[in-house]
Amino acid sequence: MDLTLVLSLLFLSCFHGVSSDSRYFTSLFTLGDSYIDVGNFVIMAARAVPAVPVWHDKLPYGMTFFGHPTGRLSDGRVIVDFIAEQFGLPLLQASLLNSSDVSKGANFAVGGATAIDVDFYERNNLVQFKLLNNSLSVQLGWLEELKPSFCNATKGCRGCFSKALFFVGEFGVNDYNFLWSAGKTEEEVMSYVPKIVEHIVRPWRGLSTKVQYMWLCQGIHQTGARQPF
Ligand SMILES: *[C@@H]1O[C@H](CO)[C@@H](O)[C@H](O)[C@H]1NC(C)=O
Ligand SMILES: *[C@@H]1O[C@H](CO)[C@@H](O)[C@H](O)[C@H]1NC(C)=O
Ligand SMILES: *[C@@H]1O[C@H](CO)[C@@H](O)[C@H](O)[C@H]1NC(C)=O
């Protein structure tokens, strides 16, 4: 499996150096959180018992581009939509919609997704509510499940990801949010940084196949003056 992986994004213009030729990338797979979720949170929230309240399934979400809510936490497109457009690919669907055509890729991102698995936060009483099971490793599991259909669609598994672009991230912001919201001090939150980074990096280490990485540092938004929710 050859794949090209982008971990987080600075500016779309970075891709000008790569190629906006759709023959270069013929599919796009994205993993992440609410920055790039295109509907998975809404689907998971509705399935959860008890159902998780959702606010972005109503206008004004979606009003500036789609004209209706799509499950994106945005009034228009999210960054991976612009990347898809740049490469002449269709806007990706939420993976949990189980589209029958995954030949151009899928978007596995879910709002609220964490780098560390959610049971860590629940087990350690860092959150007082049930989390959606949406961490990076869970999303990677969905990718594994989808692989046979994708490779089938692209005729034979050998090198079937060779023209696929993987966009991973951002991950981490929700991990830090849960820690801050649990009343951890700055020093305590800092002590989790290596663990969180390790969870983001570990899945990509030791892949037996050739991988081209592009590391683009996006950083995470300022949370300093934020009120705990
Ligand atoms: C997608 O497939 C999964 C597993 O087969 C199933 O549980 C789920 O209900 C399906 N989702 C939709 C939206 O059809
Ligand atoms: C989340 O999903 C994974 C994969 O399906 C499963 O192994 C894990 O037990 C689940 N975790 C929770 C907290 O439900
Ligand atoms: C692979 O393609 C064949 C023929 O189109 C189809 O019958 C089969 O169900 C597909 N397998 C998977 C795993 O999608």
Image: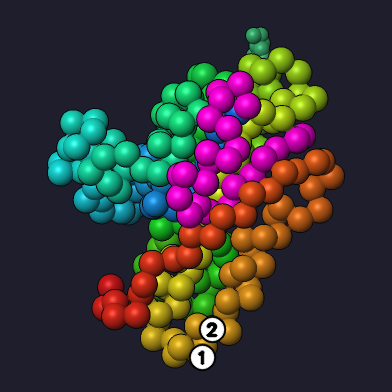
Helix, strand or loop for disc 2: helix
Tell me what residue is drawn at x 18 percent, y 31 percent. Answer: 67
Identify the mark at residue 171; answer none if there is no mark.
none
Q: In the rendered view, would you say 178 is above or below 138?
A: below
The relative height of residue 175 versus residue 51 in the rendered view (above or below) is below
Residue 147 in the image, given as x and y percentages of width and height: 66, 30
Q: CA distance from mark 1 to mark 2?
A: 5 Å
Closer to the camera in the image, 4 or 13: 13
Identify the residue at the far front of this view. 17
Tell me if residue 45 is in the magenta stretch. no
- Front residue (pair 40, 107): 107
Mark 1 near mark 2, Cβ–Cβ under 8 Å? yes
The residue located at (71%, 52%) in the rendering is 204
Residue 31 appears in view: no
Query: Ligand 2 closer than 8 Å to the CB at disc 2?
Result: no
**Looking at the image, is 227 positioned above or below residue 70?**
below
Give the magenta range.
Answer: 1-24
Considering depth in this image, is 42 or 169 the residue closer to the camera?
A: 169
The answer, for residue 64, to whether it is visible in the render is yes
Q: Quadrant of residue 145?
A: top right
Residue occupying the point 62% across, 60% down: 200
| Nearer the observer, 19 or 180 | 19
Q: Amino acid at mark 1?
A: Glu
**Which residue in the structure is indicated by mark 2?**
190
User: Residue 18 is drawn in which quadrant?
Assistant: top right
Residue position marked by numbered label 1 in the rendering: 187
